[in-house]
Amino acid sequence: MIQLGSIDLNISEHCNLSCTHCSHASPTLPRWLMSGIEVERDLMALKPFVRAESVLILGGEPLLHFGIVEIMRLVAKIRIDKQHVVITNGTLLPKMRHDFWRALEFLQISVYDGLDPEIVTMAKAKSKEYGFGFANTVFTDFYEQL
């Protein structure tokens, strides 16, 4: 069995921001979302051979994916990891419904300049209310693309 620290599950090639330092070329490239069928296919292909500490559900911006809750549930059902982690820029968190918060196992917010600090405060409170792990990373320095 191959043991990994994490596996990236890039479910969205689009973002609601257009940071100059980002390699996703959003919004220049067309939107692309990974389907639940593709998630299941890929994780089931790995399951006989791989275990990871976490599956990182990310993008682009994963909260743009209309099926984010179903994907979190699918990752938890297939369970090649100890927990899944949703990595988001946080801007869409105030729009997330009850089922999103219930399905979370760990939330990681990438805090960029301009994010309302109340969103981080709200996410911390939701973490306590719903029992998922929480962390945030503040980004102040960026590299320039060539």
Image (tube, rainbow, N blue to C red):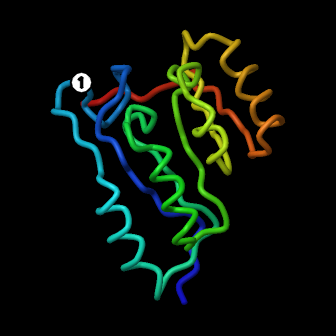
> Residue 38's spot in the image, x, y percent?
29, 62
Q: Name the image quarter holding the C terminus.
A: top left
Q: Is residue 8 above or below residue 92?
A: below
Residue under pointer 1:
27
- Identify which residue, 47 or 113, lies in the foreground: 47
Label 1 crowding class (10 Å Cα cut-off): few <14, some 14-19, many 20+?
A: some
Q: Name the image quarter holding the N terminus.
A: bottom right
Q: Amino acid at mark 1?
A: Pro
> Left of 14 or right of it: where is 29?
left
> Left of 76 or right of it: where is 134?
right
> Residue 40's spot in the image, x, y percent?
38, 67
- Residue found at x 51% / y 62%: 75
- Identify which residue, 109 or 140, lies in the foreground: 109
- Residue found at x 54% / y 41%: 87
- Name the quadrant containing residue 99: top right
> Residue 113's spot in the image, x, y percent?
55, 13
Residue sticking out furthest to the right: 128
- Residue found at x 81% / y 35%: 129
- Identify which residue, 34 or 1, lies in the foreground: 34
